Image (cartoon, helix red, strand yellow):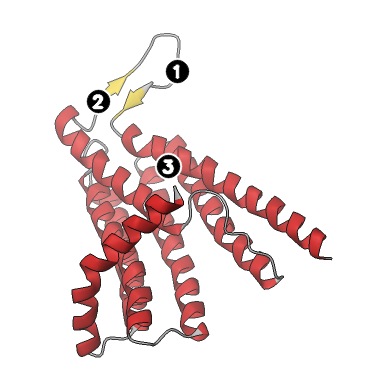
Amino acid sequence: MNDLKNNAQQFAYKLMDPFIKLLIKLKVTPNMITLFGLILTFLSAAVLIYGAEVGDRDNHRFIGYAGIIILIAGAMDMVDGRLARLNNQAHPAGALFDSVIDRYSELFMFFGFCYYTITQDYLFTSIFCFIAMIGSIMVSYTRSRAEGLGADASVGLMQRPERILLVAISSIATYLVSLVTGGDFVYRVDWLSIPIFESISIFSWPIFFLAVSANMTAIRRLNYASRVLREKH
């Protein structure tokens, strides 16, 4: 799995290197790209808030729009790191800035989805979004805190690139499926009070998976780091 991820990352770097070289000529700094990614994520939240207020419950185009913006914002996270390395601008202060801005970006992203799903009466989906937000922050915090104490805790699934990709793709897929099935499509069985499937499920199920897997990863990292620290001391 790690080999596949590394190969995909190297392929992505080859595709973006001409763009990175252009940014270097334009004297664009990694921090500028990091801030641009934050602005895009803030924009995605604004789109969701606007869509929640003016859009119909059975029209998921605003979720799709937000997903596209989040996908572009996530790409900026690769660009800033690659730019820093190729332009010899990698620095601990920049790494700290990037990490802090990434946390703000995720909080903005999940806030937008929580607002949208609550306003549009998708109760369970909004709960999943909130739990996913908790898990996402704790995955990053657990690793950071462990490393500060001298333990490597980079284990488990659902690191930031995977989280962003899952949210973005499920958002876009929800809109595309809604165009085919209709945003108000619902499948029920008589003995259940909640629907088995509806159009928003294309987003809800991946977010449920993210909520569970991210929190499991945080707990796994906690246990792993605790074991390493006990062995050291």
Residue 85 percent location from the top left of the image: 38, 80
Mark 1: which amino acid?
Answer: Ser
Which callout, 2 or 3, points at the residue further toward the start of the chain? 2
Mark 3: which amino acid?
Answer: Ile
Left or right position of 104 against 180: right
Mark 2: which amino acid?
Answer: Phe
Residue 204 location, quadrant: top left
Pointer 2 residue: 185
Q: Nearer the viewer, residue 95 or 16?
A: 16
Which callout, 3 or 1, points at the residue further toward the start of the chain? 1
Q: Nearer the viewer, residue 167 or 23?
A: 23
Task: Give the CA separation, mark 3 to mark 1.
Answer: 21 Å
SS type, badge 3: helix
Which callout, 2 or 1, points at the residue further toward the start of the chain? 2
Q: Are marks 2 and 3 in contact (CB under 8 Å)?
A: no
Q: Residue at x 61, y 67 (%)?
A: 144
Pointer 1 residue: 193
Task: Please tell me whether residue 137 is drawn above or below residue 169 in the rendered image.
Answer: below
How many numbered discs sit on the rendered protein? 3
Residue 163 percent location from the top left of the image: 42, 52
What quarter of the picture does the C terminus occupy? bottom right
Q: Residue at x 58, y 53 (%)?
A: 155
Q: Which mark is residue 207?
A: 3
